[in-house]
Structure formats: structure tokens, C-alpha cells
Image (spheres, grey):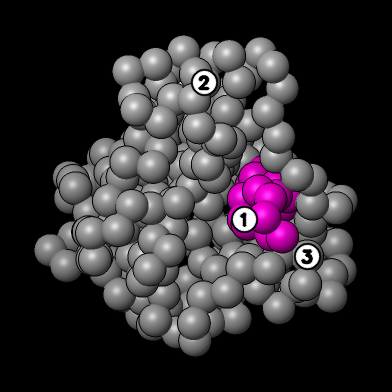
Amino acid sequence: MLELFYDQDDAVMSNMLSAVPFEDSTYLHKFGGIPPHDGVIPPEGTAPWQLLYTIDLADPAIPLVIPGCRFLCLYNAFQYEQPLIQYRLKSDSEVEFIYQDDLKVRNDAPFLPDGKYPDVLPESKAILLGEPEEVVFDEELEEFWLDELEDQEDAASSPDRNQLCALYGGVSQMQIFGHTKCKACGETMDYLASVRGEPEDKVISLWGGEEGVLILYQICPACFTIESVPLVN
């Protein structure tokens, strides 16, 4: 299941997207499937990135805009050793490779039928699970966050998008939020989405039942470069 974050009317909103086999939907959200872009094998790489989710930005429930694109495609490099990757969607058919910090292939998935990750994840339609909800602090989360930031100058300031999303998503590695830099233009990236545990276990098991895995997505507010990085809590 995907948790998506975005700004709307001076608030940070959250929405959930999940694959639902055989479900018909007005908008073309989906899990897996054949990547629509050229360039999903990184330069000097030997294996392709896999398309994890496609989000139809024509859906008014998701007020995200990426210039020149109807679809937000979230990729991950499952066949490599959990690398951080950055890429930019130039159109609905072209993706620009920006960065990958490890090109070593380790395609070992004994819990899958062939013992390895496929080049293409099985496709399933996806739907939004209800209406967007505003991301807000409660007192316990706010106290925890301020403790984490006690050495920073802005510890007592209002929480920004990255702080809210980090806490709302239950992420322990909060030091990366608001600090990861876009490799293309140098801007600080915004938290975009998270995939926790088994995203769609009725379609495919990506971690063999391991619930401690988290994939984080961030986006550059200036040039729309997207980052994917898997973590283990």
C-alpha cells in the first residue's frame, strides 16, 4: 500500500493507494506493470528498475502536478543492493536517469517462485482508499519531534512538510527528511510518499513477509526529480 503526501490549501494532506484486483476505476492508478518509459536500465547497469506504482495525476483527489506528465511513476531498483536512485520524468514516455549510488546487482528473492525479482512486477489496478486526510501533530508526536530537533535552531518553529510526514508515517530515520539534496539542481527535496512492509501482498510478496522494510520517495520542488530509497527499520 502506498501513502502519498502533498500540499493543499496551506495543509499537508495524506492519501492511501492500494491495488485491488479486477477493480474498475475511472482513473488509471495501478501497481506494477510494464514501464512506459525508455531508460529504466541505468547507464552501466545490467538490470532494469521496476515500476512499483503509477499514479494518474488527472485524478482531482491528487492535486500534484509534474510538467509534461499525466502519470507519476514510482520506480525502485529491486534487483540491486538497495540503492538510492534519482530520476526525472520528462514525459509519459521518457525518463531521465539522474543518479544511482550502487550498481551492484544482488537479485536474491528466495520467497518468489523463480528465486529472484522479475524485470516487471505483476500489474493490478489500484484505487484510492477514501478521502484525503490532513496530516497533523498530536502532543506526543510534537514532543518527540522537538526532542529529535533540540540541537537545531528551528526546533521550536512550526513543523514543515517533511517533519509532519516523517512523524505521520512513523519513520525513525528522520534525519534524512528535509536534508536529502537533488543531484540535478541541489535543492532540498520534499517527502512525497512511503511504502511500508508488503505493499500489495495479494499481488506479489516483495520482501517475503518482512514488515520492517520501508521505501521512501521524495521529490524536488524545483525540477521534479524523484528519489527512491529502501530502508530497513
Residue 58 at what x, y percent from top left?
Answer: 71, 78
The region drawn magenta spans: 1-17
Element carrying mark 3: loop
Q: Amino acid at mark 1?
A: Tyr
Disc 1/disc 3 C-alpha distance (Å)? 11 Å
Query: Which is nearer the N-term, disc 2 or disc 1?
Result: 1
* Position of residue 108 in the picture relative to residue 194 (left or right): left
* Distance between the alpha carbons at the discs numbered 2 and 1: 20 Å
First-in-chain label (1 vs 3): 1
Q: Position of residue 117 (x, y in %)?
A: 42, 47
Q: Is residue 159 left or right of residue 115?
A: right
Residue, disc 1:
6
For the point 54% across and 45% down, the residue is 161
The residue where tag 2 is placed is: 145
Q: Main secondary structure of the magenta part?
A: strand
Front position in the image: 4 or 106: 4
| Foreground residue among 168 and 91 | 168
Query: Quarter of the image containing the C terminus?
Result: top left
Picture quadrant where residue 114 is located: top left
Up/down of 89 relative to 221, above or below? below
- Which image quadrant is residue 53 in? bottom right
Mark 2: which secondary structure?
A: helix
Front residue (pair 72, 78): 72
Horizontally, is 71 left or right of 35 in the view? right
The residue depicted at 68 percent of the width and 68 percent of the height is 63
**Residue 61, numbered label:** 3
Q: Amino acid at mark 3?
A: Ala
Separation (CA) of disc 3 from disc 2: 29 Å
Quarter of the image that includes the N terminus: top right
Pointer 3 or 2: first along the chain: 3
* Residue 133: quadrant of the picture: top right
